[in-house]
Image (tube, grey):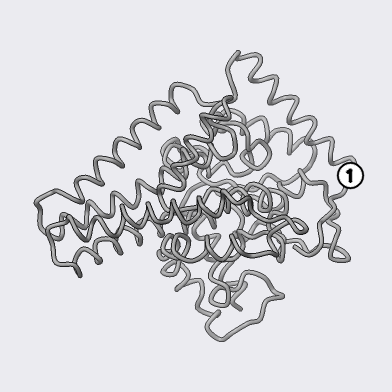
């Protein structure tokens, strides 16, 4: 991030103006808000209720270890759903017109182990601007050294097998994120603009919310759960492996697939395409016609629409995706998508195999 990137301003920028105009017209004609509706509120209540229920079941259910493991897996998956569906929208300002409601729901991100400040800095600002640009997009730091994602990165003999072992590494995503990466990125000066430093309150938030998370998802379970301590640690590991497998895989399918581009800036500072066209070339959808996939993954399978309209609640993405696709075809701009979740996984595996060889 030592140098900022400038995007092109050629006629392709008309694509963004046109797709915005048509999308705005859709909401005006339907007379609906771009923010959360009744469906989103119901989903929010359902996910949070399930989260609380599974947490107390983990602590107090008088069941054997195997049933406890099922509860731990469910709890890990549910925390992933909170991040996908509620926290993600809230931190983009897409959940509500009220900044206070967005801020309040965004706190859930802290409570499930992540850090709001780091996420807004690395994801909202950097990733959404410099998508798939090596050395700029902080979200591309996927097990550095273990997983090779660009031809300019050093190649090791083990990378030949990364399309196999990467999916195992993804299961450790939440442990690495909550116990290591947040701290590293918070204090990483290269991710800041100029001499900008985090406000003092963010230092307090970082350590205070991490302490709360460790209390609820490490200390209290060790004290309360009526099992030997090593079995409790096993349960918590299983919880993390389930959560990590979910978030680690879903996050890769939007940008690191065979069809997307990873452009190298000219003179290290310029991208030929306009920002919007750059997003279209570096981003992919998957399972766009699957209601269940969109429901569970918080619209992250509509990643193209999310990158163009991050302030629109994800429940509207299925409706506006046809508008975006038709406009892209009209302007002869790629609209990259894998038809199913499985085909997206295969495409990601193919990408890893190519980069490993």
Q: How many marks?
A: 1
**Which quadrant of the rendered structure holds the C terminus?**
bottom right
Foreground: 296 or 339? 296
Q: Is residue 31 left or right of residue 267?
A: left
Whole-percent x and y of residue 267?
A: 88, 66
Residue lying at the far bottom of the rendered structure = 157
Foreground: 83 or 248? 83
Q: Which residue is mark 1?
A: 9
Q: Mark 1 Cα within 10 Å, few/some/many (few <14, many 20+)?
A: few
229 w.r.t. 54: above or below: below
Taking the spot 73% from the left edge, 38% from the top edge, the residue there is 328
26 w.r.t. 313: above or below: above
Foreground: 219 or 248? 219
Q: Is residue 305 left or right of residue 245?
A: right
Whole-percent x and y of residue 150?
A: 67, 70
**Which quadrant of the rendered structure holds the N terminus?**
bottom right
216 w.r.t. 12: above or below: below
20 w.r.t. 118: above or below: above
Foreground: 277 or 241? 241
Whole-percent x and y of residue 76?
A: 33, 52
Taking the spot 60% from the left edge, 48% from the top edge, the residue there is 120
Q: Circle 1 — which element?
A: loop
Whole-percent x and y of residue 256?
A: 60, 60
Taking the spot 61% from the left edge, 55% from the top edge, the residue there is 255
Dividing the picture into quadrants, the one containing residue 272 is bottom right
């Amino acid at each position: 991030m030592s140098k900022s990137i400038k995007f092109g301003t050629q006629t392709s920028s008309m694509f963004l103006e046109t797709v915005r105009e048509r999308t705005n017209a859709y909401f005006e004609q339907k007379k609906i808000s771009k923010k959360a509706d009744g469906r989103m509120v119901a989903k929010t209540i359902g996910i949070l209720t399930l989260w609380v229920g599974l947490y107390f079941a983990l602590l107090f259910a008088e069941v054997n270890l195997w049933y406890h493991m099922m509860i731990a897996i469910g709890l890990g998956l549910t925390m992933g759903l909170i991040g996908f569906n509620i926290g993600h929208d809230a931190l983009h300002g897409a959940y509500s017109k009220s900044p206070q409601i967005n801020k309040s729901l965004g706190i859930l991100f802290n409570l499930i182990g992540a850090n709001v400040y780091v996420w807004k800095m690395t994801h909202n600002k950097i990733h959404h601007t410099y998508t798939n640009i090596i050395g700029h997009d902080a979200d591309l730091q996927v097990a550095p050294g273990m997983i090779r994602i660009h031809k300019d990165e050093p190649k090791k003999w083990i990378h030949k097998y990364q399309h196999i072992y990467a999916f195992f590494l993804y299961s450790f995503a939440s442990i690495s994120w909550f116990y290591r990466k947040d701290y590293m990125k918070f204090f990483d000066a290269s991710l800041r603009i100029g001499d900008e430093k985090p406000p003092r309150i963010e230092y307090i938030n970082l350590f205070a919310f991490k302490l709360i998370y460790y209390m609820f998802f490490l200390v209290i379970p060790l004290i309360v759960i009526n099992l030997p301590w090593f079995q409790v640690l096993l349960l918590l590991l299983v919880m993390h492996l389930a959560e990590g497998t979910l978030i680690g895989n879903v996050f890769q399918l939007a940008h690191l697939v065979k069809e997307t581009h990873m452009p190298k800036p000219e003179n290290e500072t310029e991208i030929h395409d306009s920002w919007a066209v750059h997003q279209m070339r570096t981003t992919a959808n998957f399972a766009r016609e699957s209601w269940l996939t969109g429901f569970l993954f918080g619209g992250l399978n509509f990643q193209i629409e999310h990158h163009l309209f991050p302030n629109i609640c994800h429940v509207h993405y299925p409706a506006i995706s046809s508008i975006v696709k038709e406009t892209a075809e009209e302007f002869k701009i790629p609209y990259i998508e894998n038809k199913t979740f499985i085909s997206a996984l295969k495409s990601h595996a193919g990408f890893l195999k190519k980069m490993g060889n």
